[in-house]
Amino acid sequence: MTKARLHPALLEFNGAMGDMVFKKRGNKVYVCIKSKGTSDPSDAQLAQRKVFKKAINHAKAALADEATRAFYEALAEGKQDTNAHALCIGDYLNAPTMDDLDFSRYHGNVGVPIKITTYDDVGVVEVNVELTKADGTPIERGKAVEKGAGSGEWEYVATVLVPLGTDIFIEAEGFDRPGNRTVASANPVVGESH
């Protein structure tokens, strides 16, 4: 990226002037050429614009809440060249992800953890776990607990004894602040090596 020193009078500009657009982020001013756009946007472009508009509306609503605003502002302080509004939009646009479930210690016993690892640009706030038999019969469900705030390392501790040899289905779903969802699942037979 090219760096230039602007005349002090230009440092106060924000917005468009002719074909140039001035954007101020923190103590820096960015200058770019105004986009010419397209006269007839594609369906993909229209869909992306719709998603981005939803992200902007989400950010406006989320930042109207004092606690949410404080969270994103504190997060923005630790990052260069961004603000709470941009972080909130990015959080909406970036769904969390999850590794494969780690049920290597689970053999149907009560009190044994199933481990879940999540990733998100701002953080996952909730992980729910459900165990069912292969035919869909519920075994148990509940919330996983994060091991250290913001670590992305979650554990769900089994509460129901499941006999060896039972074909089960384990599903974990995680959510970030905007409500984006990620899911990981496994279909082990209890007691068989994983």
Image: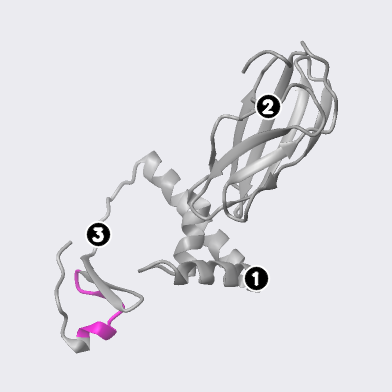
Residue ID at (83%, 33%): 159
Give coordinates of residue 87: x percent, y percent.
47, 62
Q: Which residue is mark 2?
A: 105
Identify the secondary structure beneath mark 3. Answer: loop
In space, the residues marked 2 and 3 are separated at their CA atoms by 55 Å
Mark 3 or mark 1: whose residue is earlier in sequence: 3
- Whether residue 129 is situated above or below residue 58 in the rendered picture: above
Q: Which residue is mark 3?
A: 35
The kind of residue on which mark 1 rests is Ala
Residue ID at (66%, 48%): 146
Residue 53 visible in the displayed image: no
**Mark 3 or 1: the one toward you:** 1
How crowded is the residue under tag 2: few (<14 C-alpha within 10 Å), some, or many (20+)? Answer: some
The boundaries of the magenta stretch are: 10-19
Say how many tags the image has: 3
Q: Quadrant of residue 153?
A: top right
In space, the residues marked 3 and 1 are separated at their CA atoms by 36 Å
Give coordinates of residue 42: x percent, y percent.
35, 41
